[in-house]
Amino acid sequence: MRTTQRKTLPLGLLFAGSMLLASRAAAQDVTIPVETQHNAIVLQTDAEKHLNMVYLGAKLANTAEYARIQKMYKQADDSGVQNDVYTPSGSASLGEPAITVTHADGNKSLNLAYVSHTVSKVDDDISLLVVTLKDPAYDFEVKLYYKTYFKEDVTEQWSVIKHNEKGIVTLNKYASANLNLKGNTTGGFWLKQYHGNWAMEVQPEEARLTHGIKTIDSKLGTRANLYEHSMFAISLDKPATEDEGKVFYGAMEWSGNFRVDFELDVANNLKIIAGINNAASEYHLKPNTEFTTPAFLYTYSDHGKGDASRKLQSWARKYKIVDGEGSRLTLLNNWESTYFDFNESKLAGLLKDTKKLGVDLFLLDDGWFGNSHPRNGDNAGLGDWQENKQKLPNGISSLVKEAQANGVKFGIWIEPEMVNPASDLYKAHPDWVIKQPNRPEKYFRNQLVLDLANPKVQDFVFGVVDGLFTKNPDLAYIKWDCNAVIYNAYSAYLKKDQSHIYVDYVNGLYNVLKRVRAKYPKVPLMLCSGGGGRVDYGALQYFTEYWPSDNTDPLERVFIQWEYSFFYPAITSSNHVTDWGKQPIKYRVDVAMMGKMGFDIVIGKLSENDLSFCQSALKNYDALKDVIWHGDQYRLASPWDNDAASIMYVNTDKSKAVMFNYLVNNRYGSGSKVPVRLKGLDPNKKYRVKEINLYPGTGSVLGNEDLTFTGDFLMNVGINPEASTYHTSVVLQLEAI
Ligand code: GLA
């Protein structure tokens, strides 16, 4: 990242080690380019000292030219066009605000002028730009933070709001970021957004933005992504394809109510304002205290959605998710094979099956707790995190030991943010529960949400996790679920600050997760929310993986996993083989293999061939998991447009790759008929191509000959995986020779 103040600071100085640079506004314009390896955003002051965002795109070779960008736009002052870097409301800017406040004296006018900025280098890759803006008429300040990851072309942007007025200031809207994309496109801006529901996560829609404001948001409190996602893509000119086009990707790092506004103005500029949803969430800020917004994450690519997604994936592995460059455990889960109906002897059998199957860990799901209100269904027990004495008379510790005796690890399901009215916890602490004092309770899956704004509740939730690990130091995995939204938002703890509840809930959750991670830095945690109701990088910074959907029908999963992959790396996607869907076991396993593989089936009911197929597929997975987890992902053929979907992963030195092909159209004669061009290989290397995951007794679609091709051939001509109604999924392994 560089910063220039026209005619004053020599550029060469600006990269000097971790030197901290500060500049004060002088009479002339201040130009601040925020650069990453390929991109730049440019901020520039105008005559009134307002800081504007005048550019977002590929970085320019001649950095001196950044200062000339704005002059190319000849809008009159009264054109209605504003490019504020953080749009205030109630003064001269009339667009959708990033921030709206009520000052201590009741006045609602805010003006933000540029004061100064600093740039510091955190390390070789990461820089931090901090811009200070102040209201000339009020003692009110906003600092904008731009944390840039140079190699990955990724930026995290947030703001810190502070005042020293005589009394409380109310923040009515307080976005994390406000970006302006200039209207010099040839075909406007195209928004790709996601909606969904339980078992129907991440359904994409893409359309051209029209003038006015389009908003995507959530007001669900918890499970914020159940119906809409804050992740989106904006293509410039026309919808970007996998390999071509200008595309901006953004997402909130926030696990609660979010709001993203897209405002297309009269000059066709697009303003993107992203942050916490301010609906019913005015925040009361005391003098001299800081309000820090969550980060808005973004990247930009001139080379299509594939390139943008690889940037996000490698950033996430390196910087965001827990142990992103490390390893993961394959597992057998018992949810769909037993639901709530199990006991020690049944589990002993499942532990043996875990070993027999050849996975690393057994994951005990819901139903193991509650005594006065046993968890035998989803209507009781949440909150009472003691082993059910009838099902587990010898407790979890004996199961952990039993697992060890079988040579596997043991993990467990919890949903610690929740309570069933039928529980001891509900009776002991009614004031810990989010519910209106004067309205009937409204349940989601028979349960209510605990008030994580309350530090005592945070202690309780931390204690659930800590207690499990303290009593069972060898416990190796936790699945953390969250199945209810917040109805009747009211916190007994917050008293007069009820409008803080949605924000303080999420910050309370993060406090707990921070404490968990401080004490248990690497233990694998799965982020689940009745499927993919809560998948975002705010939460994922504490987790190793997420559960994309309860829908494990592999055909549906091809689409769901495909869409998540634009934002999240394969290592984070928990894909389980279950009995959903009618496809053969091979198809189910092949689909699960494109991420972090697990199983949730009754091993004892598998035919001999099915079992031996699973066992050998796990061995193949073991050999390829490094490529899938840490390699670059390339989408080759979309399930939305083709009879068969194809994706591949290539390791860093391009010596190993794996290509997955799934038939997604079952009509007569459907299948891959032409070769699919591969990507990301070394054109000069020779690759041996081999079909793996062959079902016992079947031969390879490629025949028996030893197939070697140059990367050049594979990327220009391609290979026909022949996924068809006879071979509904085909997995090809490539090894450089
Ligand atoms: C949620 C999860 C499932 C399972 C059940 C248990 O629905 O998404 O995977 O854990 O809860 O009740």
Image (spheres, rainbow, N blue to C red):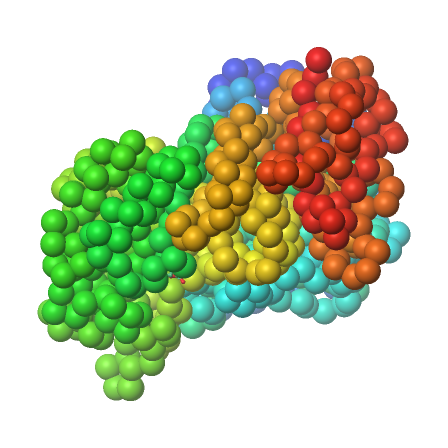
Q: Quadrant of ligand 1?
A: bottom left
Q: Is residue 546 among the parts visible in the rendering?
A: no
273 horizontally vs 728: left or right: left
Q: Is residue 475 among the parts visible in the rendering?
A: yes
Quadrant for the C terminus, please: top right
Image location of residue 569, percent across then percent down? 56, 39
Question: Is residue 6 shown above or below 410?
Answer: above
Image location of residue 659, percent across then percent down? 69, 35
Farthest residue to the top: give it: 737
Image location of residue 216, percent across then percent down? 60, 65
Q: Nearer the viewer, residue 396 or 33?
A: 396
Question: Is residue 101 shown above or below 413?
Answer: below
618 horizontally vs 4: left or right: left
Residue at left offset 35%, top offset 37%: 355
Q: Nearer the viewer, residue 694 or 451?
A: 694
Residue at left offset 79%, top offset 42%: 722
Residue at left offset 75%, top offset 45%: 723
Q: Nearer the viewer, residue 202 or 318?
A: 202
Image location of residue 507, percent across then percent down? 34, 53
